[in-house]
Image (spheres, rainbow, N blue to C red):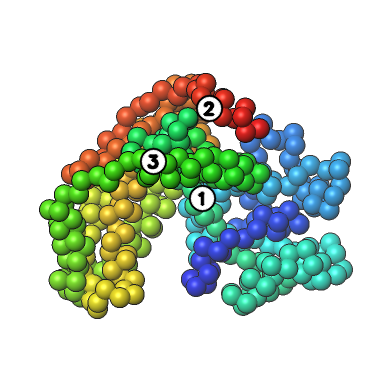
Amino acid sequence: MVWPPSVRGLLVTEGVRGEGGVLRNRDGKRFMFDDIPPNYRSSTADNEDEGWRYTQGDKSARRPPELLTRDHVARCIRREVKAGRGSPHGGVFLDISWIKEKLPNAAEHIKKKLPSMYHQFKQLADIDITKEPMEIGPTTHYVMGGVRVDAESQMSTVPGLFAAGECGAGLHGANRLGGNSLSDLVVFGQRAGKFAAQFAKDTPAGQINPDQVDQSAREALEPFDRGSAGENPYTIQHELQKMMQDLVGIVRVEEEMERALEEIEQLKARAARVGIPGNREYNNGWHTALDLNNLLTVSEIVARVAILRKESRGAHFRDDYPEKSEKWGGVNLRVRKNLAGGVTVAEVPVTEIPDELKQVIEENK
């Protein structure tokens, strides 16, 4: 959902398109018919009637272009918005109400098939989806990649840090089924937990540098010293979000990402001057101020690795490099942040599944 602001970001189920919902630009055009990838043309309807029959269970019909892969649909929506053909609030229109042209009891049909969506829009946005279209847009899924771990111990290169599932390197939230996620939690999540407990039991506590602790505490409290005279943390957060969406978003080009890195540096300087009023208790402004360094670090990492990966793969799509690259199919990018706050990126060859992991998989089938 992209409108109203109070519900911006709430998910709209793909079931709306599955039941016959169509995507239109501000001119009312079903723009998805304009861009059907060659490898999907044989399985995609080339007219509205065939697409409708598919959603109603006709086995001889091909799917409508609205049901193409999510990354492609997202790029098409982005293209319409960037070309000035989007909806008034930066998205496009998802319309299920049009099926009244096909079904005499369309309103009841929509409420029965999509009860949660009907109530979500009616209660939160005062929109009756049986009568009018919704304003929607693509949203961000998870960050690609994750914490690199040893296959046998589940431990990362940071002693005592264990990872499994979507936060581990090699698995991405949008590229797995719910069943895969469950097995990750049950099998590898349990293993990681057991290893972590044993590590804590066997390993003495590390030495703490009191000077570093005092410095961190001073830095965390500095925004209170500046008070309302400092930079507003919410403003910086909002500008960072908008800039990343515009310049390092669904479709990427090197020139825009280089601009993003320049703007990130400017936002870093402003974040160092952030100020907040009030006290420490339940102070969301303080929480946002503390988050800014992490948000800026992750944003910089995303931009830098996206510039280096000169190809399109998965949800990483580059207009200037639209094809997959044989080289980059065998390379991961490892990111490190040094104590001074700088970020370095290194190419790491992808290796085959280690024998230890094969054994774990075999044991836990």
Q: Report x, y in % for residue 55.
A: 79, 52
Residue under the image location 35 percent in, 27 percent down: 347
Dot 1 lies on which element?
Answer: loop
The N terminus - image quarter? bottom right
Looking at marks 3 and 1 on the same chain, the residue that comes earlier in the sequence is marked by 1
Residue 112 tag number:
none
The C terminus - image quarter? top right
Q: Report x, y in % for residue 43.
A: 75, 37
In the visual, does 336 lie left or right of 102? Answer: left
Circle 2 is placed at which residue position? Answer: 357
In the visual, does 165 lie left or right of 281? Answer: right
Residue 199 tag number:
3
Nearest the viewer among 134 and 163 is: 163
| Front disc: 2 or 1 | 2
| Residue located farthest toward the front when viewing the structure as drawn | 202
| Badge 3: residue crowd in 10 Å (few <14, some 14–19, many ≥20) | some
Looking at marks 2 and 1 on the same chain, the residue that comes earlier in the sequence is marked by 1
Q: Report x, y in % for residue 293.
A: 27, 54
| Front disc: 3 or 1 | 3
- Answer above or below: position of 27 versus 70: below
In the visual, does 63 lie left or right of 306? Answer: right
What amino acid does circle 1 point to?
His
Q: Report x, y in % for residue 187.
A: 58, 40
Residue 261 seen anywhere in this rendered image of the structure: no
What amino acid does circle 2 point to?
Leu
Nearest the viewer among 80 and 242 is: 242
Nearest the viewer among 47 and 282 is: 282
What amino acid does circle 3 point to?
Phe
Circle 1 is placed at which residue position? Answer: 141
